[in-house]
Amino acid sequence: MADPLPQALGPLLRAARARLAAVDDPALDARLIVEHFSGTTCTQAIADPEHAVDAAALVQIDRALRRRAGGEPVHRILGYREFYGLRLSLSPETLEPRPDTETLVEAILPFVRATVMREGECRILDLGTGSGAIALALLSAVPAAIATGVDLSEGALRTATRNAAKLGLGDRFTALLSDWFEKVSGRYHVIVANPPYIRSEDIGNLQDEVRDFDPRLALDGGADGLAPYRVIAAEAAKFLEAGSRIAVEIGYTQHIEVTAIFRSSGYAVAGAFGDLGGNDRVLVFQRGKP
C-alpha cells in the first residue's frame, strides 16, 4: 500500500513523481495530475513549496496516481488534451489527439485560408471527427471557415459538439452521425481525415496506453490498414467543389500505398508532410494533375 501523500505542495510533487517512477515521464505526469486536482501551478510550487493542499484534493490526486501507475494515460485521467492550442475534452469514444496530427492542420491550413480569401468561406468535412480536434483547430484559426464533423460514434459526436460549444465554435460546427459518406450531403472545399490505419492483426501489438484506452473503432483500418483510404478515395469526388483538397493522416509506412489508392481514383499528390519525428504523416490530394 502506498504511503499517505504529504500535504505541502513541494513534497507532494516529489512523492507523486516517486509513485510514477515506472511510467515514461514521471515528472511531467506527476505535475499534470497535482496541478489539475489541486488547482496549483508550476510557479506556485517553486515560489511556495509549503503551500497546503486540501484533503479533498489529496484524495483525488491519490486516486489519479493509482490510475496512472496502473497504465491509464494521464490525459484520460485528466479528461482533456491540449491540441493546437485548444483544450479538448476526451471521452471513451474518442481517440486522444496527439501532436503528430497537428501536422495535418498545418498542411491544409494555407489552403483553407486561401479558399476564404477567394470564396468568402471554406466548407470543411472532417471524417471520423472524434473529439473534433482537426475541424475545431481549423475553425479556430480561420474565422470564416465552417465544418461538418462526421463520426460513427454518437458518444464521440457528443464530445465534439461539447468541445465546439466550449471553444465558442458551436455556430460553425455541425456534428453528423454517418458511416463515412453515407449521410453526407452538399459539397466541400476541404475533406480532412485521420482515419483508422492500423492493421487489424497489429492492434494487439500497440502500446498498452493506445490498445487499452483508445477506441478500437478509431484504430482498426482493416486487414491491411488501408480500408478507410479506399472508401474516401472512391466516394469523395461527388462531395468536393472544383479545385478542392483532401488531406489525410497516414501511418509512417503507408505513403506509397495510400498515394496509389488515390491515384487510381483520379487524384494527384498536392503535398506530402512529415511529422515531428520526420516520419511520413500527411498526404494532400487534388483531382487531376497537380
Image (cartoon, rainbow, N blue to C red):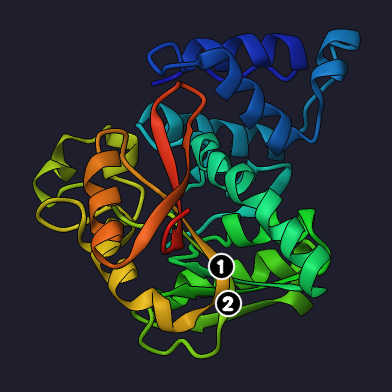
Residue 152 appears in the figure: no
Q: Which residue does the numbered mark 2 point to in the structure image?
A: 188
Picture residue at 67% right of the left edge, 51% below the top = 109
Q: Where's the N terminus, which quadrant?
A: top left
Q: CA distance from mark 2 to mark 1?
A: 7 Å
Q: Earlier in the sequence, mark 2 or mark 1?
A: 2
Where is residue 104? Give x, y as percent. 54, 46
- How many circles with numbers are drawn on the protein? 2
**Image: 160 above or below 80:** below
Label number found at residue 179? none
- Residue type, numbered disc 2: Tyr
Residue beneath the point at 76% across and 17% down:
9
Residue 141 x/y as whole percent: 78, 53
Q: Nearer the viewer, residue 125 or 110?
A: 110
Furthest toward the right, the residue is: 47
Residue 50: x and y, percent? Answer: 84, 11
Judged from the image, the secondary structure of the residue bearing numbered disc 2 is: strand
Q: Nearer the viewer, residue 251 or 93?
A: 251
Q: Residue at x 82, y 64 (%)?
A: 117
Do residues under tags 2 and 1 come within 8 Å of each other at their CB atoms? yes
Q: Position of residue 59 (x, y in %)?
A: 61, 36
Image check: 53 left or right of 257? Answer: right
Label 1 CA crowd tier, 10 Å (few <14, some 14–19, many 20+): many
Q: Report which residue position mark 1 lands on.
A: 244
- At 44% from the left and 78% from the top, the residue drawn is 154
Residue type, mark 1 in image: Ser
Which of pointers 2 and 1 indicates the residue nearer the eye?
Answer: 1
Q: Secondary structure at mark 1?
A: strand
Up/down of 186 relative to 236, above or below: below
